[in-house]
Image: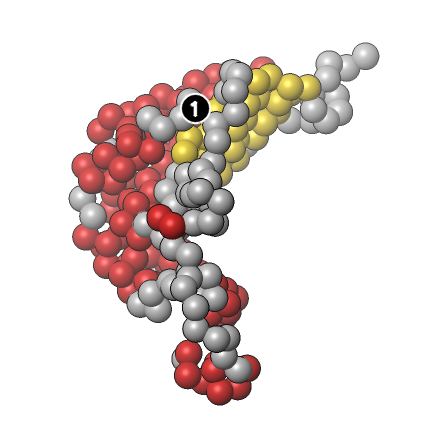
Amino acid sequence: ALEIVARTLGQITPRERPQPDRLPLDAPRFLVPQGSPEAKIELGRPGDPAGVMIAIPGADEWNTGAMAHMTIIARALQGTLNQRCTVDRSLAQRVFVQHAPGAGVPGSGLLAVWGICEPGLASLLADEINANLDRMIAEGPNAVELEAARAAALDELDQFFADTRYWARVLSDRTFRVRPLDEPRRLRELIEATPARIAGATLAGLAAQAPRIRIISTPPAPR
């Protein structure tokens, strides 16, 4: 693939490429803002639903092992929170979990959970999300969660890597950082083989790096 690109588009003069552990500007890292990581804000119009966000640090995209582990965790949390929050306890209209890996600046990854609910249920929803996240940090996903998470993660992975935009980014990024072209295969193998305790240990290590973010937004009261 690289030979075809070089023949078609030309080739940049070879030079040393910065690596994640040798970034310019004295290896900047994501800085945790000072102050409380919890906030309650008024947002929207009377009658709108409330919103909840809970977030902790995530993996960096060049750490393939941690990426695989956090992909498993995100899918496991998604399945569990869907059941607990929208079915069992009817706390939320929708819950969405996303792991956004750090790109460019080490330590900027994020595992975030969003929930949409009735305003009077926002605090209960935040507590339920935190309780399930705490359990996942302490124990990792259980056997049922792990099996479902693997299936969902592998399906998601196949769709992501089938997108030509991913490969365009990989080739353009090689000017600054060499990403292994077999990364999709390595990531898939790790997701298939990683045990629950290892994924849980990675989650626990990342969660300990910064205070947990908890934001609740509620609409203004009717006048």
Residue at the spot x=48%, y=31% of the render? 31
**Percent position (x, y) of residue 213?**
48, 24
Residue at the spot x=44%, y=38% of the render? 29
**Percent position (x, y) of residue 39?**
57, 18
**Percent position (x, y) of residue 172?**
50, 67
**Percent position (x, y) of residue 11?**
49, 79
* Side (left or right) of 133 relative to 162: left
Look at the image and tell me whether residue 77 can be seen.
yes
Q: Quadrant of the C terminus?
A: top right
* Furthest residue in direction right, as rendered: 223
Residue 156 occupies which quadrant of the picture?
Answer: bottom left
Name the kind of residue labelled 1 in the image.
Arg
Q: What residue is disc 1 on?
A: 212
Residue at the spot x=33%, y=40% of the render? 73
Residue at the spot x=49%, y=87% of the render? 7
* Side (left or right) of 151 relative to 160: left
